[in-house]
Amino acid sequence: MIPGDYVALAVILFVIGAVGVLIRRNAMVIFMCIELMLNAVNLAFVAFARLHGTIDGQVIAFFVMVVAAAEVVVGLAILMAIFRSRRSASVDDANLLKY
Amino acid sequence: MTGTLAGLPMRAASALPTLAAVGVQRTAWLMLVFPLAGALVLLLGGRRTNRFGHVVGVAMPFASFVVAVITFVAMLGYPASQRARDVHMFTWISVGGFHVDAGLLVDQLSISFALLITGVGSLIHLFAVGYMSHDPDRRRFFGYMNLFVAAMLLLVLADNYLLMYAGWEGVGLASYLLIGFWQYKPSAAAAAKKAFVVNRVGVAGFSVAIMLMFATFGTVTYTGVFGQASSAGRGTATALGLLLLLGACAKSAQVPLQSWLLDAMEGPTPVSALIHAATMVTAGVYLIVRSAPIFNLSMTARLAVTVVGAVTLLFGAIIGCAKDDIKKALAGSTMSQIGYMVLAAGLGPAGYVFAIAHLIVHGFFKAGLFLGAGAVKHEMNDEVDMRRFGGLRVVMPITAATFTIGWLAIIGVWPFSGFFTKDPIIAAAFAKGGISGALLGSAAMIGAGITAFYMTRVLLMTFTGHRRWEPDAHPHEVPPVMTSPMIVLAIGAAGAGAFLMLGNRFVDFLSPVTGAPPASRGLITPVSGATLALVVLGAVIAWAMYGRREIPVTAPAARFPVVAARKDLYGDAVNEAVFMRPGQWLTRLSVYFDNRGVDGLVNTLAATVGGSSGRLRRVQTGFVRSYALSMLVGAVLLVGVLLLVRI
Amino acid sequence: MNAAHVLAASTVGAGAVVAFWILAVISVAAALGLVLAPRAVHGAVLLAVVMLSLAVLYGVAGAPFLAFVQIIVYTGAVLMLFLFVLMIVGVSAADSMRETIRGQRLAAGLAGIGLLVLLALVVGHAAIGPAAPAGSNYGVLNVQRLAQLIFTRYVFPFELTSALLITAALGAMVLAHRERTSPKPSQRDLARQRVRGDHPAPLPGPGVYARGDAADMPALLPDGTPSPLSLNPVMARRRGSAIRVPGPGVPAPLPPGEPGKDGGPDAEPDREGAHP
């Protein structure tokens, strides 16, 4: 394997995820884009671990997965609560906190 | 002036040997304590003292009078040069270099005033028992009156200007409270305010004078100030004199601060008699005479004093001619008579004694006249319009008799008091010499003629002629408690002048303090003859106009001079035009400036901040994606900068 | 230790390169599809594709443990959680792709390009070389070495993650919980409501025909018209349904506490959604 290619792929996926977060309104899709970014980062961790011949990067990637799981659980719960009260999954509808 | 000024005695008061009081004089402070205690008891005691309030109110001034007489007798026991005694009471203020003792100066001048205040004051208090008998607030009235007596005694007995100032403000307060005694009457409340406000002007002058004294001499005691006065320079003396004159003008209702006195007649008549005729309004004269060592140093200040006096004596007299309100006619007369005193005081040592003599005599006859007017008013259901009087001498013979004696005294008919005190003033004015002396003397002489006219008018309209009473008026002679003070005052009005002036009795008594006037040139002089002729002329004209003819119940339409006099010679109009309207304009200008300028600046600033904030807060759209975008852009920029720095 | 394994992991084999390029294309295409797909469900499926691709790449890169965790935990559990929530929120709703915030899409694009350029610069500048020789960490001992690291050097963060997971579970329970604002109706209340309502009897069941399943076909009234009461409103909204019942804005005239349907208030979102 070539770590440089892996990192390049990770960069592309990360940017796609970031743009997705910015242009999508559906909170579910935004969540999924965040997951995509996390996965891209994980890929970079794995590639760098391989680059150095150590596996600390894999440990970090493992932790990222754990934290991502926790984040998804809480985030989806919040999303449910919002949906219950506002009948909408659009993040633009939850805009009460403004000027 | 030539003769007098050459020997202008600097010893007048500056070298006054002030000895510590001994013996019975040490209790002179009791004079103050009695009325003060009376005021405290009556004002703080509340309704509990209603029953015996008037007794206390009369007893306290009488007690003071007794103390004053004892002190006076004790004083007579000393030789003339040792009669001034200082009664130290306590240390009042001691701040750094500023040290003021509360002390009383009992000398010939102050004891004269003290006797006048307590004597005439006691009589008027006694009169007021009857006059106020139907008033539910009689106890409060006596409380205020006692307060006034205490403050007035403090004013005249103080041994320094600051303590005098305290008394000065005390009488102002008492005057305010008593003018507005019937405060439910809007006119009374307004008059009280007016008196207070006008007196502020004078007090400003007086207080600046005290500050100037302290700044210049480092002390405010009479002895300290007078001892160094000659070293202070002519300019300082002139400034002090003019500032003190300003204070005197306000308190004594002299032009241009005269406007409050006529309105002050809204107060109960005993108040008018005591405060606004006999005592308080003469405080200005006392101030000038007491400050003689300062005025002696400044020709300018004294000239100003004489001019003020001469103008006021004519001013008051002309107003007195046109007023149909008996109290206001008498008030105009008071202004005029005090004008004589101020004129005399302005003449320097040549006039000080005559000023004080006229002051004391005036205290008798004017108080008597006011009490007579009060008695008439009391019996005529509080009617004061003389056109509604007439023929009262039949039903009120004692009042009419005492009033007549007062009339004779004020117009200066021999041998009544006014003759002995007013003529020397006119003579002294002429003796000043030069054009100013001739003018001042002529003014005083003409004033005497006008005085005769308006006083005769008052007498005739009130006590003679047909009865023009209101249908429900049933006048009777007032009770003895009211007639007896009038009788005593009438005796004083008749005899005091002769008693004081004949044989130079009062001149000799007072001259250690004020300096001696030149020797009198006999009883009947060309000046007094001419004056007497003018007086007779004025009285005859008044008789021709008001004694012979029927007096209409309503005032007839009149032409310019009468209309002007009825309107107090436009004193209020001048005040309004010169002070009130510019003041209002200034206020409006300030308000405009405040609204548009200050507020405008602040509001503009606030609006700018508010507007820009309002625009800035639009950044907070509430859209999570906008925030995410800014975060991403920020992250990109941050990483870019880091990269640039690292590369 | 198997030497062949080590060799395979440490050298750049042709198979690995081919696999990378195939998976790279697939994952990027799927990621783009995730961003551009109007329906969230499609996005979820495409995300699963990305994740599976990455799992394979992990395996190629010598991280078999992560590869399986990626499949089992990420794709299997997390993504399924997404799908469950999507069911609740509404699987049928296709997002409008029209941008409502002015300039957002342009700015997002510019920021994305900027980020891409920046990261490319960084990566290019770093001049990432070939992989280091794989030691004993890679290959069959990978799982043991990971375990050693996790329970020695990274034991404290690991314990912290346990706290985080517990907190997250509690938080999710708290957030998903809804307080009952009115007392729970008793059996008697329900019966009384039912008798007072329009339909004391059970609602008519859906019609059964040879051409369709039972759930989305309305029952026919005696005059031949379909009965709106026989259908779940969610079903009625489906394409081709014979009956149009009022949209989601106007609730269907269902009596409260309707038996026969799982009539708790929590089940309400179910009726709003529709099958894809």
Image (spheres, rainbow, N blue to C red):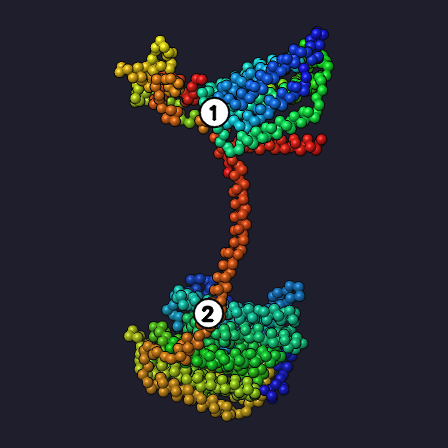
Q: Quadrant of the N terminus of chain B?
A: bottom right
**Mark 1 Cα within 10 Å, few/some/many (few <14, many 20+)?**
some
Q: Residue C128 location in percent, x, y?
A: 70, 21
B78 or B332: nearer the viewer: B332
Residue type indicated by callout 1 = Asp
Q: Amino acid at mark 2?
A: Glu
How far from the left and from the top, in percent, is residue B497?
Answer: 49, 85
Name the front one of labels 1 and 2.
1
Res. B576 mark: 2
Can you see residue B283? no
The structure residue drawn at horizontal position 33% and vertical position 22%, both measured from the top left corner, is C193
Residue name at image x 52 percent, y 74 percent: B249
Position of B636 compared to C245: left or right? right
Horizontal side of residue C23 vs B570, given as left or right:
right
Q: Looking at the picture, does residue B563 appear above or below residue C187?
A: below
Image disc number at residue C95: 1
Circle 1 chain = C
